[in-house]
Image: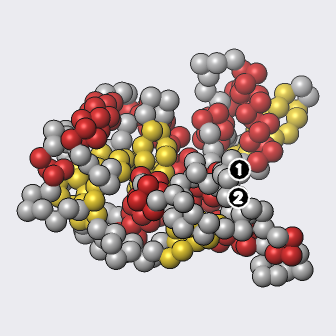
Amino acid sequence: MTSPAIADSEFVYELRVCRWAELAWPPEETENDETTYLVARQLGTKQRRWDTVVVECDPDALQARAAFGDDELDSDLLHVVRNAPAEWTWYRDALPEPDYPWRYVREAVHRAAGRGVVQTRKNGNQIQIKRIAPYPDWMRRLIAIENKPDLDASAADRLADQLSHDIETGLADEVWVATAETGATVEPALLEALPVEAGILTTDFSGGVDAAAASVAWHPTAVTPTHSDDYRNSRQLELAERAYGRGWRDYQATMRPDCRHFELRRNGRLLIPWCAAKECHQSSSACSSSCSEFEPEPPAWRTQGWPIDGGPGVGIRQLLEKRAERER
C-alpha cells in the first residue's frame, strides 16, 4: 500500500495552492478590485515551466474573449485572430508578414475557420478572411508561483537558480514561492538564499483549503523585463491563452476517473483526487493505465443512467469541467 505521506506530495500541494489562489488572490487586499483572476498549473516555455500561474484579467475584456470559444488559441491562431480585419480581405494582405512560410499561415487560417474564430470565403483563387469580433486585450499581468511544501536547504538551492532565471528573463510580472508554514518565529524560507525579488507565501492547509490558508511572509518586487515589449506581450498572451483553455483541473485528463477506486474527496473548499484502493491522494503519474490497482467501472455503473448517466467517471469529468467553466 502506498504511504499517504508519499502520495501527498507536490502534486497535491499544487492543487491546494491553485484552489487557494482561485479563492483568495491577490494575497492581500488592494484598492483596485476591478480585476478577474484565472488560475492554471504546469504552464511555461521550453526553458521553464511554472507550478501555478495566475493571470490578472480585465473582467469586461475577459467576457468578450468568450466569443472565441472555451479552448485556447495557440500562437498561430493568435496571429490570425488578432489581425483579422473588419472587412473581407485577402489573408496575405490582412496579416502581418510572418517569420515562417505563408503556407503555415494558410493552414492556421483554415484551422481558425474550423474553430469558428474567423470567417473565410473564396474570391477566385484567394482566401479572404473577416473577424467575428475584435480580439480583446483581456490579459493585464502574469504571476508565477513555485510550490515547495518542504523547502529544505537542498530544495532551496535548486529553487534559487530557477527563480533567478525567472527574474532575469522577466517573462512573469511577479514571482512567488509557496511553502508550508512551520510555525517557527522566523520561517525557514526567509533564511534561505532565495532571490529577494521573489515573494514568499506560507500556507497552512491542515484545516483544508480556504481563503485564509495562506499569508505573505515576504513581498515581491517588480521584475524588470529583458525582452522587447512586443516579444514579452506575445509570450505572455500565449501563456494566458493556455491558462484560459486548461485551467488547473485538467489533471483528470491524465488520470483514470473511470477506475472504480477513483474518488473526489472534499478538503475544505477543494475537491481532491483520492484512491480508495491505495487509501491515499494519488498523483497524476501514479494514477494511470499502468497502475496495478486499476479496475474498470462495472458495466452496470455506466448503463441505464445509474448511479450517474455514463458512470461515476463521466460524472467526475463533467463536474471538473463545469467548475472550470464557472471560474473562467
Q: Is residue 300 visible?
A: yes
Asked if the residue at tag 2 contacts the one at tag 1, i.e. Cβ–Cβ closer than 8 Å, the answer is yes
- What is the quadrant of residue 205 in the picture? bottom left
Residue 289 got which mark? 1
Q: CA distance from mark 1 to mark 2?
A: 7 Å
What residue type is disc 1 on? Ser
- Residue extending furthest toward the front: 1
Q: Position of residue 10 (x, y in %)?
A: 41, 52
Dividing the picture into quadrants, the one containing residue 18 is bottom left
Q: Quadrant of residue 282?
A: bottom right
Q: Is residue 135 left or right of residue 10?
A: right
Specify the amino acid type for callout 2: Phe
Q: Is residue 293 above or below residue 305?
A: above
Q: What residue appears at the point 71 percent right and 50 percent down from the top-left corner? A: 289
As drawn, the label of residue 46 is none
Look at 51% across and 64% down and name the residue there: 280
Q: Quadrant of the C terminus?
A: bottom right
Residue 222 appears at what percent x and percent y? 23, 44
Instruction: Classify mark 1: residues with Cα within 10 Å, few (<14), some (14-19) or many (20+).
Output: some
Q: Which residue is mark 2?
A: 294
